[in-house]
Image (tube, coloured by chain):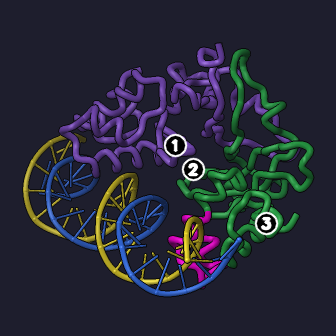
Chain colours: A purple, B green, C blue, D yellow
Amino acid sequence: MKAITLLKKYQLRKTAHRLGILQFFLDESKPISQRDLQSKFPDCDRVTIYRILNLFQEKGLIYRIVDTDKVVRYAFSKPQKEIHHHEHIHFKCEDCGNISCLTDITAENFPLPEGYTIRNVNFLVLGTCKKCNQ
Amino acid sequence: MKAITLLKKYQLRKTAHRLGILQFFLDESKPISQRDLQSKFPDCDRVTIYRILNLFQEKGLIYRIVDTDKVVRYAFSKPQKEIHHHEHIHFKCEDCGNISCLTDITAENFPLPEGYTIRNVNFLVLGTCKKCNQ
DNA sequence: GTTTATGCAAATTCTTTGCAATACT
DNA sequence: AGTATTGCAAAGAATTTGCATAAAC
């Protein structure tokens, strides 16, 4: 899916900054912070980046992940194919600092006590990843 | 367990503010923010609260939970009995805003892919709780 | 042509730092 | 007495708001 198609679908104006930032989310599988975008798009004002992130989040295009170091990151929330919507859990390795995706665990199969329903699994599990464990 | 015993055990000076704040953590099962403490202890300078929270966290007395609204909260991390240390997952209901504890799910039984190890389960699951689901 | 987005400046909130006065051991 | 903690002022970082200009529809 292309950025321009998504903006049209969500009835958002197709500005250069929005197209660039949205495409970056589509290309990147890892969560992205406002700082990441600032260095990636130096010509875009930082306030504009904040506004675009807030807009995309309100519209449900991206969702928020807050790290334990209080850094707010965002990830694209819709799948490539529009059949199923599997938001996944992110895993942050405290050794290498890398954030990866745990595709096995989703909102659907997360073990919850009876009576509870999950809406978001926008969280981070902290530990050591496979590579650093070797 | 009493606050004064814990401070002694961790070789921290027993000041009035530390005793009051630590006792509050012991009495309260829900995560506590710096703001909560500010309104609970109006005579304690906000900088002092920050410093006490940072100290307790470094020493491992409390641990950090970052909410999706970016509010940093802390919870007491040591169990009443010192046999087992089960950090648990917190569940935030987006309907009533309440944060509760999922005691069934711990770091030990959290479903992870092979090769990964969990260090912290200090995160928040978002959804609707049993009460609000009725 | 009308509505919305952007850039700049400034305001707000959260958190940390420096330093002198105070409290703990 | 000596060391660590506190309070106050100020600095720093992250994010939001107001408003005039510019771009999208």
- Which stretch appears magenta? B34-52
Amino acid type shown at disc 3? Glu
Q: Predominant secondary structure in magenta?
A: helix
Q: Would you name the residue on which mark 2 appears?
A: B68
Q: Position of residue D14 (x, y in %)?
A: 39, 52
Q: Quadrant of residue B116?
A: top right
Does A8 appear above or below D11?
A: above
Q: Position of residue C5 (x, y in %)?
A: 26, 47
The residue sitting at 60% across, 22% down in the picture is A83
Instruction: Tell me the tag on residue B28.
Output: 3
Q: Which of the pair B4/A21 is nearer the observer?
A: B4
- Disc 1, SS: strand
Is disc 3 surrounded by few (<14), some (14 to 19) or many (20+) residues within 10 Å?
A: few
In the current view of this chain or complex, which residue is farthest to the top?
A134
Please tell me whether residue B41 belongs to the stretch shown in magenta. yes
Amino acid type shown at disc 1? Arg
Q: Which of the pair C12/A15 is nearer the observer?
A: C12
Q: Which of the pair B1/B127 is nearer the observer?
A: B1
Question: Is disc 1 in contact with disc 2, using a CB cutoff of under 8 Å?
Answer: yes
Residues flagged by tags 3 and 2 on a common chain: yes
Q: CA distance from mark 1 to mark 3?
A: 28 Å
Q: Position of residue B34 (x, y in %)?
A: 59, 66
The residue sitting at 62% across, 39% down in the picture is A123
The residue sitting at 57% across, 45% down in the picture is A68
Q: Would you name the residue on which mark 1 appears?
A: A64
In the picture, the quarter occupied by the N terminus of chain B is bottom right
Does B59 appear above or below A105?
A: below
Please tell me whether residue B31 belongs to the stretch shown in magenta. no
Is disc 2 surrounded by few (<14), some (14 to 19) or many (20+) residues within 10 Å?
A: many
- The chain identifier of the residue carrying mark 3 reads B
